[in-house]
Image (cartoon, grey):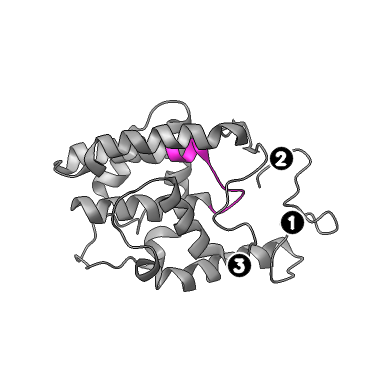
Amino acid sequence: MYEGENDPYIDESTGILKNLLGITNAQNLESAEYNIAYARSSDLYQNVRPIPPFDMDHLKAIHRHLFQDIYSWAGEIRTIDISKGHTRFASAMAIDSAGTKLFKDLEKENWLTGKKRREFADRAGHYLGEINVLHPFRDGNGRAQRYFMAQVGEWSGHKISWQGISPEQNIAASIAAYNGDSRLFADLIFSARPAVQRSRSIHRDDLER
């Protein structure tokens, strides 16, 4: 559960995120969010094509597409500072400037094209870790950033499948990256090859973990 002071996203009467479905139970909201994001992911590539520029607007478009049916703020940068446990994410006021610099750096690397798998994984792990530190949305960051990086992989010729990677592995990689070490993310991406090559499609279990 994310923590934020004077959180305008929270319904004070229920203690959970305000949502378009009128859900008042945390478990039901989590389930609805999961299922809605899955349903929307089926036509993600028709609505947010995996082509450059891979920038903040692209990430916002992915988030908006996935969560538009449940949150009025889908695709919008959060307006408050948030933390999770001992992890405090980027200040809301710094997201735009930090994100602009980060995605400009990605552009300078030509969206990671022309790299062997190991080098691609190392650089993709770096950027995934930095996007995670930004945590630009009030919720739904993990799913949006994994779809984002999978689309970068599609474009650069390195498909990424998150299937088989556990939540615990993702959490460990996120914590390490927050502390400046993106190697766990890089190793996950390096080994995250689809068992069967799929053209322009990513399935639910690949990204929801």
Is 124 a magenta residue?
no
N-terminal of the pair, mark 3 or mark 1, is 1
C-alpha separation, residue under disc 2 versus residue under disc 1: 12 Å
How far is the residue under mark 3 from the one under mark 2? 22 Å
- Which mark, by number, is residue 31? 3
Question: Image point 35% across, 67% down: which residue?
Answer: 45
Decide if residue 197 is on the left or right side of residue 186. Answer: left
**Quarter of the figure with residue 176:** top left
Residue with the mark numbered 2 = 4
Q: Amino acid at mark 3?
A: Ser
Residue marked by disc 1? 16
Disc 2 is placed on an element classified as loop
Q: Judge from the rendering whether residue 204 lies leftward or rightward of residue 136; answer left or right.
A: left
Q: Residue furthest top?
A: 180
Residue range (magenta): 130-140
Question: Which tag, 2 or 1, sits closer to the chain's start?
Answer: 2
Q: Nearer the viewer, mark 3 or mark 1?
A: 1
Amino acid beneath label 2 = Gly
| CA–CA distance in space, label 3 to label 1 | 13 Å
SS label for mark 3: helix
Q: Earlier in the sequence, mark 3 or mark 2?
A: 2
Q: Are marks 2 and 1 in contact (CB under 8 Å)?
A: no
